[in-house]
Amino acid sequence: MTTRIHAMHLGAALALLGLAGAPAHADPLDSVKAAGVLKCGVGSQYKPFSFVQDPKTRKFVGYDVDICDAIAAKIGVKPELVFITGATRVTDLQSGRTDIALANLTNTPERAKLIDFSHNYFTVDVKVMVPASSPIKGFADLTGKRMAGISGSQHEVKIPKVIQGVDLKVFPSPANAYLALEQGKVDSMAGDETTLIGLIEGKRDKWRILDQPVDQQQIGIGVRKGETRMLAAVNDTLTELEKSGKAAQIFDQWFGAGSDLKMKRSFTFAPYKQP
């Protein structure tokens, strides 16, 4: 009996020691710091957000790349680009394949249930592009016509509400949608204005972007649900970039005066506004 009691006490003691020695669940930000790398989900060849500018170096550059670099520097780690698609941006983040998600990720109520969003770091109108020779002048002319949209971009939700009777076909990337338009497989293409302008660089005389917007997108950086310290690090970086003027410089380089797009910056890095 005594031996049995001693054995029970010994087992309990070992169990307590085992619990005491078990490592506590690390905060995700601490895990990133320990790994020394921040995995940023970005698009592949998504000009001017992330793309190869020089085929010789194969180095990726762009708006999202600069933002990723700034956040990694704030945390004190190296940036690592992880290429994702519009359809996998959220799931790649949830699974841990990425630490933060960029790639033109619009803040929507549906997505906000799945992930947390940073402050807006971009705002842009969604518009429709047609061939310059097309008789399509406005949304009313798109009824019964084929339109290319982009998977995972909310086009399936937004466009039917604004354009009645359009035959929407979604593609995995802006490049795929644009190719379908070039090949005449669709009559029009929907996309954020910056993406459309980027796609037709050097061929602006061949295409026409309709004036009327489908929607305005508030774009944030995705963080896994409940990762408050990671979210704070991202937001602190965006706030510092805005206050220092660096945010405007990054925009001008890729979208504004320093780019071929020559767009004007009509937003600041700021908290999401309810539409």
Image (cartoon, helix red, strand yellow):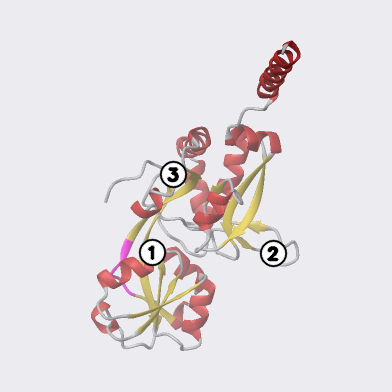
Q: Which residue is mark 2?
A: 54
In the image: residue 99, left or right of residue 106: right
Residue 238 to residue 106: above or below: above
Q: Amino acid at mark 3?
A: Asp
Residue 110 percent coordinates (x, y): 36, 54
The x and y percentages for residue 101 are 53, 51
212 magenta-colored: yes
- Circle 2: element type: loop
Residue farthest along the top direction in this orientation: 2
Residue 63 location (% of width, % of height): 54, 53
Q: Is there a contact, CB below 8 Å, between mark 3 and mark 2?
A: no
Residue beneath the point at 29% across and 72% down:
160
* Residue where numbered disc 1 is placed: 154
35 with respect to 110 (left or right): right
The answer to whether residue 90 is magenta is no
Q: Is residue 40 left or right of residue 144?
A: right
Residue at image location 52% in from the left, 42% down from the top: 246
| Residue at image location 31% in from the left, 63% down from the top | 215
